[in-house]
């Protein structure tokens, strides 16, 4: 079960970074559902653990200074979301001239649901850099 949670974390981080790159440098509202998919609140109006984990990944990116944003709106979105220059330059990085930039490799891995590749790319470029 722990592996699934970690895979979800890396996927959420990748989707968040790629979403930020789409409109860089313009700030935007980022909806948590755009990162992890639709959420159904329980009978008490609480979000699912999956939704809260995705929100946690977004907040972790801010704590690590990869993104900036204003307020968290009812655990549903973050306002004025934008990549930091630290994240932007890492996403554009090409290991060598024949390789595609990280954002293209990461986008392909997300589209193919290749959790191993997503994990490896993010570890190499964001955690171990």
Image (cartoon, rainbow, N blue to C red):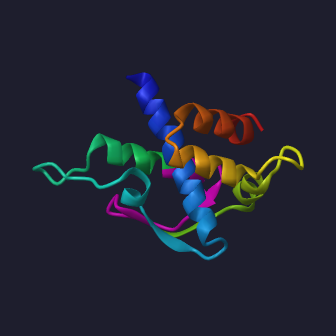
Of 51 and 15, the residue lying toward us: 15
> Residue, x 59% and y 63% (percent of image)?
20
Q: Is residue 113 something that shows in the picture?
A: yes
Q: State left or right for residue 89 relative to residue 120.
A: right
Q: State left or right for residue 7 relative to residue 102.
A: left
Of 102 and 82, the residue lying toward us: 102
> Residue, x 15% and y 48% (percent of image)?
42
Q: State left or right for residue 89 relative to residue 16.
A: right
> Residue, x 72% and y 49% (percent of image)?
102
Please count the marks in the image.
Answer: 0
Indicate the quadrant containing the N terminus: top left, top right, bottom left or bottom right: top left
Q: State left or right for residue 94 relative to residue 91.
A: right
Q: Position of residue 29 (x, y in %)?
A: 47, 71
Q: Is residue 59 above or below residue 81?
A: above
Of 80 and 121, the residue lying toward us: 121
Of 23 and 58, the residue lying toward us: 23
Q: Position of residue 30 (x, y in %)?
A: 46, 65
Indicate the quadrant containing the C terminus: top left, top right, bottom left or bottom right: top right
> Residue, x 32% and y 62% (percent of image)?
74
Q: Extreme right residue here?
A: 97
Write the start and end of the magenta stretch as one range: 58-78
Q: Is residue 62 above or below residue 118?
A: below
Q: Is residue 63 something that shows in the picture?
A: no
Q: Extreme bottom residue here?
A: 26
Q: Is residue 22 magenta?
A: no
Q: Position of residue 12 (x, y in %)?
A: 49, 47
């Amino acid at each position: 079960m722990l592996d699934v949670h970690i895979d979800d974390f890396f996927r959420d981080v990748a989707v968040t970074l790629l979403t930020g790159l789409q409109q860089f440098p313009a700030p935007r509202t980022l909806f948590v559902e755009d990162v992890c998919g639709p959420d159904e609140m329980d009978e008490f109006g609480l979000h699912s653990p999956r939704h809260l984990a995705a929100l946690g990944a977004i907040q972790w990116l801010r704590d690590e200074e990869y993104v900036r944003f204003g307020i968290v709106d009812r655990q549903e979105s973050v306002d004025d979301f934008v990549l930091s220059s630290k994240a932007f330059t890492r996403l554009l990085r090409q290991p060598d001239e024949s390789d595609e930039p990280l954002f293209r490799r990461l986008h392909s891995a997300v589209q193919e649901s290749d959790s191993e590749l997503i994990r490896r790319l993010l570890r190499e470029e964001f955690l171990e850099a």
